Image (spheres, grey):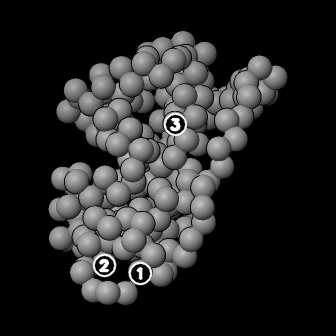
Amino acid sequence: MDTEAFWRALDAAKDSDKPLDVAVVDHLSALPAEEILAFEHRFSRLRDAVYRWDVWAAAYLIGGGCSDDRFSDFTAGLVALGREWYARAAACPDALAEHPAVRIAAAAGDQDVIFDEDFNFVASRAYKRLTGDSDAFWEDWEAYTDALATTEEEDGEGMGESFDFGDAQQMRRRLPRLAALFLGSGPG
């Protein structure tokens, strides 16, 4: 599944009245097993592309802190936002300060906006529905990624420059709009 097909699948699910993760599972479970694995592969690549310190800093501000597991939920949530917002956040994580849900969450003190643990598992849930076997996805996923490992290169861009998320001054300098929403306008 190429990137365009991935985003089309996500867009189709967004037209449903169901929660996005449920709608994606419904959509994927109607596809052949190989397509579900290909969806997971594209999803993993998109998440890997935003596995960076600057994005993690945005998650830290929005979530009032952010562990490794919680950052996984955040990167899944970025993908779940859709192509436009994913691209904006990937280019400049501070742009998330313009997202309406982030602005509402900042005002309400909601630290869960964007974090989407359930979206991490849409492919495995669809695979289980298709095959009836809860272990089949993980076994087939391992074989799928092993086969890709011989043909696919890592992009190797890394996580960028590390910095102290607890340093309010640095956060204000690096993510000024998000810091203004979540830290206020104080000096440090």
Q: Residue furthest top?
A: 32
Q: Quadrant of residue 151?
A: top right
Q: Is residue 120 left or right of residue 100?
A: right
**How crowded is the residue under tag 3: few (<14 C-alpha within 10 Å), some, or many (20+)?**
some
Numbered disc in front, either 3 or 1: 1
Residue at the (58%, 34%) spot, across then down: 45
Measured in 3D between alpha carbons, the distance from the residue under mark 2 to the one under mark 3, in whole angstroms, is 29 Å
Q: Which residue is mark 3?
A: 46
Residue at the (49%, 80%) spot, across then down: 166
User: Considering only order in the chain, which callout, 1 or 3, is on the residue closer to the N terminus?
Assistant: 3
**How crowded is the residue under tag 2: few (<14 C-alpha within 10 Å), some, or many (20+)?**
some
Residue at the (55%, 60%) spot, across then down: 53
**Placement of the C terminus among the 4 image quadrants:** bottom left
Q: Secondary structure at mark 3?
A: helix
Q: Quadrant of residue 69?
A: bottom right
| In the depicted structure, whether residue 49 falls above or below residue 73 | above
Q: Which residue is mark 1?
A: 168
Q: Amino acid at mark 2?
A: Leu
Residue 66 appears anywhere in the view: yes
Q: Which residue is mark 2?
A: 183
Looking at the picture, how far across and down is residue 58, in whole percent?
A: 41, 62
Looking at the picture, how far across and down is residue 129, in whole percent?
A: 50, 26
- Marks 2 and 1: CB-CB under 8 Å? yes
